[in-house]
Amino acid sequence: MVAAWLAIHVTGIFFWQWSLATLPVAIVMIGVQTWLSTGLFIVAHDAMHGALAPGRPRLNRAVGAFCLALYAGLSYATLLPRHHDHHRHAGTSLLDPDYHGGDPRLVAWFGQFFRTYYSHGQIVRITLAALVYTLVLGAPLANIVIFWAVPALGAVAQLFVFGTWLPHRDGDTPFPDRHRARSTVASPLVSLLTCFHFGGYHHEHHLHPGTPWWGLPARRRAIAERQEKPA
């Protein structure tokens, strides 16, 4: 995943030649890069739970920090305690940094999401990287925007809508348990494409946070089989 992201990133920013013939390819690349950017965040998220490399905390931290830096200059050290607060206090207005109590609307929740995960430090890091790309390495600013900023913003939308708002907002259907999380109704393929299974299997993630993203469908099957067995 990281190799594919880097390949599109470097090719698009430093080597892309614009023409009518390359425009459709660029659009596909942006779409793929958006999905891969979402994946970088999910890999870092697995690292926060120790699911990326079980029993190897240093490796989890290193890979998680690297993926977040590539994706959007995010700080792993800052996000780690906030994410664990979310799991410990899911659905609690004052303690869950992902939750916006009293207002289920998308805009209100996005404001809370943005304040939780994005900071002035991140903006400084991204700005410095863009300056190095343009002034030192000669990359066109337009290419930086198109092949880095646009996919990163698209990934923000995916992570927020499918990984936070839909699973945790209050609705007419009650939450199944104290985790105050629900899995959205989606086929395994749609779940993979929208948010690497963190929408379609979000409740399973809260039940078993040590399960990596790719293991969540199997985790659901195991839960269902266990529930079907006679007592």
Image: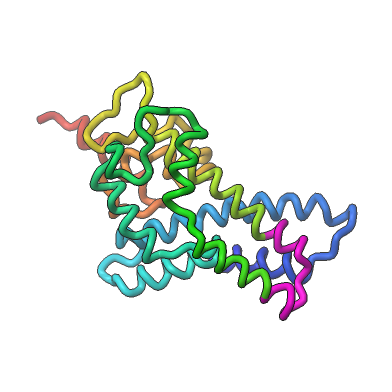
Q: How is the image coloured?
A: rainbow
Identity of the residue furthest to the front in this view: 120
Q: In front: 136, or 13? A: 136
**Residue beneath the point at 10% across and 30% down:** 231
Identity of the residue furthest to the left in this view: 231
Side of 85 relative to 129 (left or right): left
**Residue beneath the point at 23% across and 32% down:** 177
Q: Which residues are magenta?
A: 132-147
Residue 21, compared with residue 222, is above or below; it is below
Q: In front: 192, or 88? A: 88
Question: Where residue 35 appears, x then y in whole percent?
Answer: 58, 51
Identity of the residue furthest to the right in this view: 20
Question: Where residue 54 appears, x then y in whole percent?
Answer: 28, 65
Does 108 appear in magenta? no
Quarter assignment of residue 44: bottom left
Quarter assignment of residue 25: bottom right
**Residue beneath the point at 25% across and 43% down:** 89
**Residue beneath the point at 54% across and 66% down:** 70
Question: Where residue 220 appears, x then y in whole percent?
Answer: 32, 40
Side of 228 relative to 114 (left or right): left
Residue 142, compared with residue 88, is above or below; it is below
